[in-house]
Amino acid sequence: MWALHEGLDFACVEREEASRRCQLRAQLSMHAKGGLHVTQCNRGDCHHNYGAEYRSRSEFLERWPESYSRHGCQYGYRPQAHGAARSRWYFIYAAARKDADLPALATIKNVQGVRLDVTHPDDIAAAVETVTKGGRGLYALVNNAGIGSASTLKETPPEEFASMMAVNVTGPYLMTKAFAPLIVAAKGRIINIGSISGLLSSANLGPYQMSRAAVETFTDVLARELASSGVHVSIVEPGSYNSDILKNAVRRAGMNADVADRSKLKEADEVVAATKAALFEPRPKRRYMVVPDGESAEITIRAQLEKLVQVNEGQPYTYNRAALIKMLDEALAGARPMQPLTEGRPPPTRH
């Protein structure tokens, strides 16, 4: 998450400008109409003009974010995500479970590493204290911590199942509950990193898919709870991209990690882009499904349609085809248009 300093005198932000950075001291002055004005950079060796008018303080805060927190950074999509964040104007609190990962985070400008295990309430409380004492406020929380599973429901040991639920479900709940006051105060955003696995059912991924399905419901309920507070809640639902999540799962199971090698899959740049959109868009979507190919998108969408049919069929209030199509048209009326295809990605299959 990210938040700008609340002082009206000035705000220091960082901007990536072409191949160089410049430090911008944004002088703020209140207009008679209640707007804000941001003047040009006043650093001696920088002459970029950042003059801009803002209708309100809330518009300024939305367009010039500064403080952002992300947990679950030792695995997954961290390099791209941190690079994306640093290219704008954040101060990032990046959490890692292992002490060994903190020195690397400390070398990144505008990033403060925080040791955090989302299954330990004491760690979470300490992280809240760190962010609060930082005095920057907190605009967004990205719940990224997660572990995978490489076994079926009947084969998964109870302790492995409990561990997965603790990290993938209880962790985001505890983190969100702890940081909610800061997010509400900033009218900020909460982004849960889920998976299309939360929308699908496979014979060999039961425990993992159960945990991701729980995050789907968590996101929807949280969005309703916080809507009146001005907080937006979204979920990013990646498909299969290059990450270590399965490698770590098979290693915990005592299996050869090579069987879970995902290094030949696409890099997760599209996942990072979706997370940025959830953080920055003026009207963020509830769901950002991000898949590497049209086939994955079709499988996921068809699975949702199959559930709709199953829920609707053979009950006293079953809707016929015409009524369902009318409902679909009404729902699609508020949906966004199709996005341009990523280069090299085939269009969805049409039947």
Image (cartoon, rainbow, N blue to C red):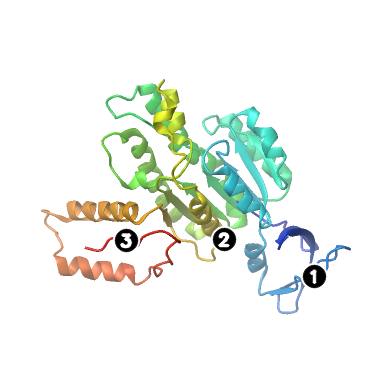
Is residue 181 something that shows in the picture?
A: no
SS class, disc 1: loop
Residue type of the residue flagged with mark 2:
Phe
Name the foreground residue: 225 vs 300: 300
Q: Are marks 1 and 2 in contact (CB under 8 Å)?
A: no
For label 3, the residue is 348
Q: Earlier in the sequence, mark 2 or mark 3?
A: 2
- Using the numbered discs, state the Cα–Cα distance from disc 3 to disc 1 in whole angstroms: 46 Å
- Other-residue count near label 3 (Cα within 10 Å), few / some / many at <14 / 14–19 / ≥20: few
Asked if disc 3 and disc 1 are in contact, CB closer than 8 Å, the reply is no
- Residue lying at the far top in this picture: please name it: 254
The residue type indicated by label 3 comes to Pro
Disc on the earlier residue, 1 or 2: 1
Is 310 positioned to the left or the right of 70 in the image? left
Question: What residue did someone put label 1 on?
Answer: 40
Picture disc at residue 67? none
Q: Name the residue under label 2.
A: 280
**Rendered-image quadrant of the C terminus:** bottom left
Q: Give residue 25's position: percent from left, percent from top.
A: 80, 62
- Disc number lying in front (3 or 1): 3
Is 210 on the left or on the right of 129, as rendered? left
Q: What residue type is labelled 1?
A: Gln
Left or right placement of residue 118 versus residue 108 in this view? left
Secondary structure beneath label 2: helix
Residue 10 x/y as whole percent: 79, 62
Query: Which label lies toward us, 2 or 3?
Result: 3
> Which is more N-terminal, label 1 or label 3?
1
Please state if 229 lies on the left or on the right of 137 as rendered: left
